[in-house]
Amino acid sequence: MIRKLLVCCLLLAFAGCAESAPAPQGGKYPTSRIEAGTPVWDGWPADGPPPAMVPFNADEAETHRQEWAAFLDLPVEPELKLAEDVRLKLRFIPPGQFLMGSTGSESFKEPHGGPVVVTISEGFYLGETEVTQAQWTAVMGTEPWSDDANIRQDPACAASCLCWADAVAFCEKLTRQEHAAGRLAEGWRYTLPTEAQWEYACRAGTLSTFYFGEDAGQLVDYAWFNRNTWYDDGPVAQPEEYAHAVGQKKPNAWGLYDMYGNVWEWNRDWQIGQLPGGIDPLVVTMGTHRSARGGSWDRGDKCCYSAFRFWISPEYGLSFTGFRVASVPSGQVEEEPVTAEREDASESP
């Protein structure tokens, strides 16, 4: 009962965010929509490959990855050894430009603004999957999810019951470990993706509702969500009300698994109503909620698509909150104190 009350409170908090925030003074937000593929930044290296400007298909998506990684002399798919039998694989995401937010072709409409043109000026890495229980334990030595009834204890399952500060602490410790071991280049660090980086990586060149098109019926092949975990026009025969093993569904064109469903993935940004466009946007103005993306095992298809935005109080570590690691040049990370502490998910807010 307490858990249901907590979830209801979160839903009410989200509903309260539906009002779009006014644009700040100084014209931070675009006043008009720009067609996909329209250059808005002239900072690309003259001798570099063409930027990954939407729309592009799956073959072009991979070409962008390979060409930019080669140009920057970076590995395309580095793999971290966290323990003897625990690996964490990253995938290089090339710089480019995309339309963030609901586009004209989408069957679902995100109410919080958009689309806005966003430029991702530097390449970065993103975890091939959400951080698993095994990966979390290898780095942190704890099991924050162990007392939650909606958890399947399995090293391959996405780590959940993690608040925002938990996710940041993992990234910071991983950065220290990899720097000390000489496996992470100077000037790079592990962190959470920005909301813009997350959607750019999720879309992988697409303008459609889902990165596989418009047919919500195909989502069962790409995501763990309510239709294949606990409810499909009625309770499923054998409900599986928990985060599942990662990497079992189909990936997107950049080889990222479970970008829809399974667990909500924490982002670096604070909550803001209106989408901030521009170059490498990041909302650092402190608020009450942090951005989370992707949907989760307990939500339907209208929460599990590329543009859908969700916000959660950063102190909550719930059975449907987890994260995915990003690796970025240190200059991309806005320094800020981590003030949110874990609140026991068994207590009501």
Image (tube, helix red, strand yellow):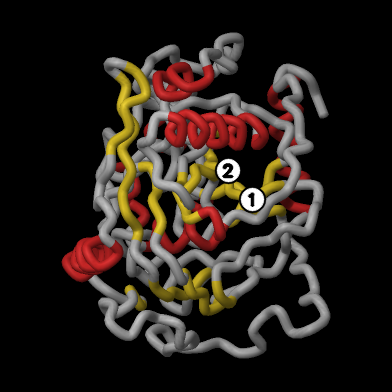
Position in image of residue 177 (x %, y %): 47, 29
Residue 242 appears in view: yes
Q: Closer to the camera, 43 or 65?
A: 43
Q: In this view, does 51 lie to the left or right of 289?
A: left
Of residues 3 and 40, the one drawn nearer to the viewer in this rendering: 40
- Between marks 2 and 1, how big is the CA–CA gap? 6 Å
Q: Quadrant of residue 51?
A: bottom left
| Within-10-Å neighbours for mark 2: few <14, some 14–19, many 20+ | many
The percent coordinates of residue 327 (x first, y second) are 44, 48
Residue placed furthest toward the top: 147
Looking at the image, which residue is at 34% across and 69% down? 206
| 248 up-or-down from 32: above or below | above
Q: Is 263 displayed left or right of 317 in the figure?
A: left
- Figure quadrant of the N terminus: top right
Residue 315 spot, x, y in % from top left: 74, 33
At x 28%, y 36%, the residue is 79
Residue 128 horizontal/vertical position (percent): 33, 42
Return the residue at label 2.
266
Give the label on residue 291, or none.
1
Q: In this view, does 153 lie above or below 298?
A: above
From where the camera sits, is residue 218 visible? no
Q: What residue type is labelled 2?
A: Trp
Q: What residue type is labelled 1?
A: Ser
Residue beneath the point at 80% across and 76% down: 24
Dot 1 falls on a residue whose secondary structure is strand
Marks 1 and 2: in contact by CB < 8 Å? yes
